[in-house]
């Protein structure tokens, strides 16, 4: 896409949110169009503050019918704790296992954990449909016990959907996401809630996953409901869709400059 000189102020008074990994290059491009650019903070993954709930779940696996892994970190930290408590991985053989992505499935299989269901997409509807197909109907959920190891104890759409179908769900903190600049997360959440972000730009599939990890969610649709989503190519746009987002902008060529130009053109057309 050739830059049109008339678009140089198209992003004036627009705030664009970008990943820290591409902050320097993409910020420079966007600022040429007059944008205000902010980055979301880098994150680190650590063990939970307290292992009591995780240890109790591991020691009482016989009480569960299913375990659902929806992040690679959930696999890593749960299996690591298994070893620390001197449990055998074979103890998971008595449970049905759902891995919500191929990457999670590969990680489990490399650790000698069987996988029964791979929905292929991480959205709640896809997971529920895959489980329903495996079980033979929605009524089969009734009375089943599900364990979901993840970053936080907060309820989410998946656990709510399972409970609505009659299942019991335990969400156990297997790890925690620590932002290197935690006050920034609070400020960013306030900006998103208050309509202070006009656009979020994703330049990689891992960037989409990292942003979702920052807010401990597999469904970004509600968090970014009023934010324009821009992706550097169709592959990244598909990853965004897996997290409940529709890409409003997809660059014609997979390049930082093309993405910035596409964002400027999009907002320029809104002003016409």
Image (tube, rainbow, N blue to C red):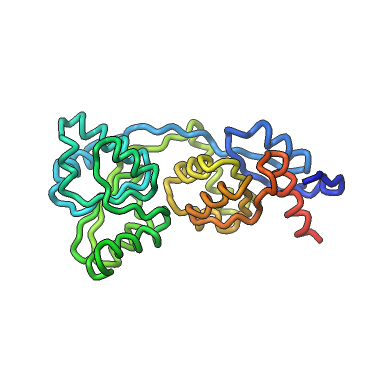
The C terminus lies in quadrant? bottom right
Residue 93 placement (x, y as % from top left): 17, 45
How many discs appear?
Answer: 0
Residue 119 position in % (x across, y down): 37, 55
Q: Is residue 138 above or below residue 221?
A: below
27 is higher (above) or lower (below) than 165: above
As drawn, the residue found furthest toward the right would be: 5
Closer to the camera, 271 or 93? 93
* Residue 172, percent from left and from top: 27, 45
Q: Quadrant of residue 127?
A: bottom left
Identity of the residue drawn at 36% across and 43% down: 104
The residue at the point 69 percent across, 45 percent down is 253
Q: Which residue sits at x=30%, y=40%?
A: 108
Going by the image, does 53 lie left or right of 185? left
Residue 34 horizontal/vertical position (percent): 77, 43
The answer to which image quadrant residue 72 occupies is: top left
Locate residue 4 relative to residue 234 in the image: left or right: right
**Side of 194 where 113 appears, left or right:** left
């Amino acid at each position: 896409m050739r830059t049109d000189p008339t678009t140089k102020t198209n992003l004036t008074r627009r705030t664009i949110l970008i990943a820290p990994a591409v902050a320097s290059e993409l910020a420079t491009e966007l600022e040429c169009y007059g944008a205000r650019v902010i980055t979301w903070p880098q994150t680190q993954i650590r063990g939970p503050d307290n292992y009591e709930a995780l240890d109790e779940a591991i020691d009482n696996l016989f009480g569960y019918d299913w375990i659902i892994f929806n992040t690679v970190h959930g696999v890593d930290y749960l299996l690591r704790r298994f070893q620390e408590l001197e449990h055998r991985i074979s103890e998971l053989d008595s449970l049905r296992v759902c891995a919500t992505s191929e990457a999670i499935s590969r990680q489990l299989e490399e650790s000698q954990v069987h996988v029964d269901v791979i929905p292929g997409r991480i959205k709640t509807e896809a997971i529920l449909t895959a489980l329903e197909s495996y079980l033979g109907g929605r009524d089969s959920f009734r009375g089943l016990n599900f364990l979901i190891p993840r970053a936080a104890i907060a309820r989410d759409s998946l656990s709510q959907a399972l409970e609505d179908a009659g299942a019991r769900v335990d969400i156990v903190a297997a790890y925690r996401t620590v932002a290197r600049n935690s006050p920034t997360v609070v400020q960013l959440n306030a900006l998103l809630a208050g309509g202070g972000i006009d656009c979020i730009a994703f330049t990689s599939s891992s960037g989409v996953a990292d942003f979702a990890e920052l807010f401990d969610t597999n469904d970004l649709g509600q968090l970014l409901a009023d934010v324009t989503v821009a992706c550097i190519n169709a592959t990244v746009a598909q990853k965004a869709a897996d997290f409940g987002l529709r890409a409003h902008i997809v660059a014609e060529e997979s390049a930082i400059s093309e993405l910035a130009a596409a964002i400027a053109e999009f907002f320029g057309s809104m002003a016409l």
